[in-house]
Image (cartoon, rainbow, N blue to C red):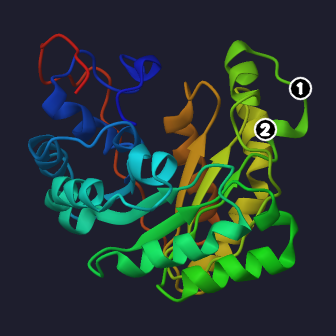
């Protein structure tokens, strides 16, 4: 996500041609969730544009398409998978991990299917799995079984931390909408690989969001000191302040780990480089 309407003119220049929007975002953050690929596999030319707008060290965590994970539930989707892998090939080293987000109904009894799917994936990518079935968070045996499946192929378990979000009732339209859609599961903070990935959902209130991520600051600092390279995505229900919040989280971690590389200097909203009307790519 790098074309969020509330950011235009506030944090990012506006207007910008499609070929410059990701470049502008990349001056604020050095990683992005490739969530649009869940809804449609992009054209290879589109992905080539993404690569052209970012440095090789920029991180894409790219979600597998919905037909693979939710409709076919990891079975019989070979053609869709091959099409997807071909489309994202231009990202090269920027493809930090391929993100297998599974539906809430995908539970411990489906681990055999997940294991078979992961075993068939090509070795040229790293993989990370997000589960939403509560048994994986509440049943120790189910959690260990999932860790075993992931460990056999070196895949990571992505936690989606919504604890702070569900701490008290919603107070805005965006929060009320998210209240009915986001998973309500316990916080999990165990890394399986040297590249842990965290998805954190706060509130539309900035102060409450920062209070809710405090456990993650300590966890990320520990991971860095262990030699791991974590990627953290900060969300709020409306995501209006997500860019400065992500940088604030990074600053809090860097205050404790000074050797952590600083983020780029963000582009000023006045630095527009084009005047094309905005379109969705």
The residues bearing labels 1 and 2 have C-alpha atoms spaced at a distance of 9 Å
Q: Residue at x 27, y 43 (%)?
A: 41
The residue beneath circle 1 is 169
Q: Residue furthest right?
A: 168
Compared to residue 164, the image places residue 75 above or below, namely: below
Compared to residue 109, the image places residue 10 above or below, namely: above
Q: Residue furthest top?
A: 277
- Disc marking residue 38: none
Give coordinates of residue 98: x percent, y percent.
39, 62
- Camera-side residue: 134 or 242? 134
**Apparent side of residue 196 relative to residue 210 in the rendered image (left or right):** left
Find residue 147 and report its image quarter.
Answer: bottom right
Q: Residue at x 87, y 65 (%)?
A: 138
Compared to residue 35, the image places residue 271 above or below, namely: above
Dot 1: within a 10 Å radius of its alpha carbon, few (fewer than 14), some, or many (20 or more) residues? few
Dot 2: within a 10 Å radius of its alpha carbon, few (fewer than 14), some, or many (20 or more) residues? many
- Camera-side residue: 166 or 98? 98
Give coordinates of residue 42: x percent, y percent.
22, 41
- Camera-side residue: 12 or 65? 65
Provide the secondary structure element on which disc 2 rests.
helix
Q: Residue at x 21, y 64 (%)?
A: 56
The residue beneath circle 2 is 165
Give coordinates of residue 2: x percent, y percent.
36, 34
Q: Residue at x 38, y 74 (%)?
A: 126
Image quarter (top left, top right, bottom left or bottom right) of the C terminus: top left
Give coordinates of residue 95: x percent, y percent.
30, 63
Image quarter (top left, top right, bottom left or bottom right) of the N terminus: top left
């Amino acid at each position: 996500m790098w074309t969020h309407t509330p950011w235009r003119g506030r944090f990012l220049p506006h207007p910008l041609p499609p070929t410059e929007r990701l470049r502008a975002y990349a001056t604020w953050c050095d990683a992005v969730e490739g969530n649009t690929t869940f809804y449609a596999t992009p054209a290879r030319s589109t992905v080539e544009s993404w690569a052209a707008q970012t440095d090789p060290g920029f991180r894409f965590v790219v979600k597998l398409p919905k037909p693979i994970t939710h409709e076919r539930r990891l079975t019989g989707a070979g053609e869709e998978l091959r099409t997807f892998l071909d489309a994202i090939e231009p990202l090269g080293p920027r493809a930090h991990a391929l993100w297998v987000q599974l539906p809430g109904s995908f539970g411990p009894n489906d681990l055999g299917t997940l294991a078979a799917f992961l075993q068939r994936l090509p070795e040229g990518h790293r993989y990370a799995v997000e589960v939403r079935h509560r048994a994986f968070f509440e049943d120790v045996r189910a959690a260990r079984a999932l860790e075993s499946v992931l460990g056999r192929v070196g895949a990571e378990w992505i936690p989606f931390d919504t604890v702070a979000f569900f701490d008290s009732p919603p107070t805005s339209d965006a929060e009320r909408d998210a209240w009915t859609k986001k998973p309500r599961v316990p916080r999990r903070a165990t890394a399986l690989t040297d590249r842990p990935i965290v998805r954190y959902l706060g509130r539309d209130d900035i102060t409450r969001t920062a209070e809710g991520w405090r456990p993650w600051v300590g966890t990320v600092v520990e991971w860095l000191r262990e030699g791991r390279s974590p990627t953290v995505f900060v969300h709020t229900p409306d995501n209006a302040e997500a860019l400065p919040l992500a940088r604030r989280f990074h600053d809090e971690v860097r205050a404790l780990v000074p050797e952590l590389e600083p983020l780029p200097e963000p582009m000023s909203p006045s630095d527009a480089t084009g005047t094309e009307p905005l379109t969705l790519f």
